[in-house]
Image (spheres, helix red, strand yellow):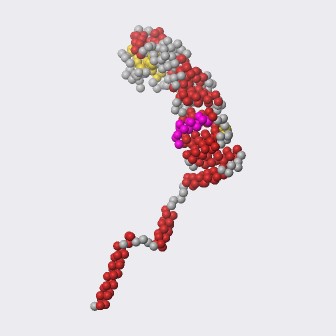
Amino acid sequence: MHTAQKVTGRGCRVRCRAQCSHSRRGFRLPGLPAVLALSACLAVSLAACRQPLSREELALRKAKKTQAELEKLLQTGNFNGDSRCALVKQIAQTMMAAKEYNALIIFLTDWVEKNPDDSYNAYWLLMTANAYLENDARPIARYYLERIIKNYPDLLVQGQSVHFLCLQNLIRISETSGNRITYYNQLISQFPNNVNITEIYYRLAQEYENEGEWDQALKTFALFLNRADAQSIQIQGKPNAYASAKQLIDFSNSSKDWTFASLEELLAAVKKAINKYDWRSLDKFKSKVNFFAMSWRQDESDENSQNSFSMHSYMLGNKIHCAEGLDPSSTPTEAYFRTWGWSNRYVTVWYLYFRKVNFPSDPSVHGRWEWAGIYFGEKL
């Protein structure tokens, strides 16, 4: 009995210790060997999960290392002008390659401020402006580009004029026609051999139009038309540059005596002349410049659409009819008037095309109406 009790007691103590240890396992701090073992396991695990650096990351690390070395080298100050310029340029290009635009701006503006006699300061500020453009900060970029043109002599870098590059950027980012007029004129006067003057004249004339400087616009369009390559030049976004400029100048130089004060007056006069078979009056009412006669599929700028002919041969011996009013597709600036019965080999239906005169240069004509052309056939 005594032995059995002793064994039984020891068993209870063992069970109690085991239960106690199990219940407190979450609160016991491991010893140093366990911590070291756990750290080793984590290190192995992290090393196994770590991905190799991409080419971009490796290039960025290399660029930052090179930048730090170059900046340390620059601080020694033992360089002549050209060597120092090359070193500053290398640092700036390294920052640009790493897309560290803010650091580049601080570095270059600080350099210009501390080295006012550096002959390459115009170039450093151009790089500053480019960094702002990369950050989509156009107003600040424009400030630096204009500052270069106004305050620094021009500089050739790798055969390129810094002022020319500034003007190109200013034209691209400017938001007002007034500013672009200034920049285009500077290009024409300072860099005539660096640009296509013919295209610049056309774009400059359009900017004058946008600003309401009509006399300057007409003079500049005339300069464009007088260029030898005006008829053949291809201007991006302006497929009919020559035709549109010529029409404007031709209209400007004409008598404009065929226009009517209102669309109602023009329509009434044309209907009366058709009903009376008065071809002489119809010939008088037609626009004397830029009048076209074409199918609906043609373009007004096509050479064979510009026609100057008398209505006499098309009215003679035919019964001409006309609609009571304008076609429903007419707008406040354009109107279509259906007529039929004309002597035509293929098509007897003609739509007479009336348009509101858009010529702000002459207030006495601007806003009047003209008979500008004829469309052959039914409307598409």
Q: Which x, y percent locates residue 42? A: 48, 66
Q: Main secondary structure of the magenta part?
A: helix
The vertical placement of 133 against 225, above or below, is below
Q: Which x, y percent locates residue 202? A: 57, 26
Q: Residue at x 52, y 18 (%)?
A: 361
Region rendered in magenta: 135-149
Q: Residue at x 47, y 9 (%)?
A: 280
Q: Quadrant of residue 369?
A: top left
- For the N terminus, the quadrant is bottom left
The vertical placement of 237 against 346, above or below, is below
Query: In this rendering, would 90 be left or right of 341?
Result: right
- Magenta segment: does it hold 137? yes
- Magenta segment: does it hold 276? no
Q: Which x, y percent locates residue 82? A: 70, 44
Q: Quadrant of residue 129?
A: top right
- Asked whether 326 or 338 is in front, the reply is 326
The vertical placement of 213 against 146, above or below, is above
Q: Visible in this render: residue 247?
A: no
Q: Residue at x 42, y 71 (%)?
A: 29
- For the C terminus, the quadrant is top left
- Asked whether 342 or 328 is in front, the reply is 328
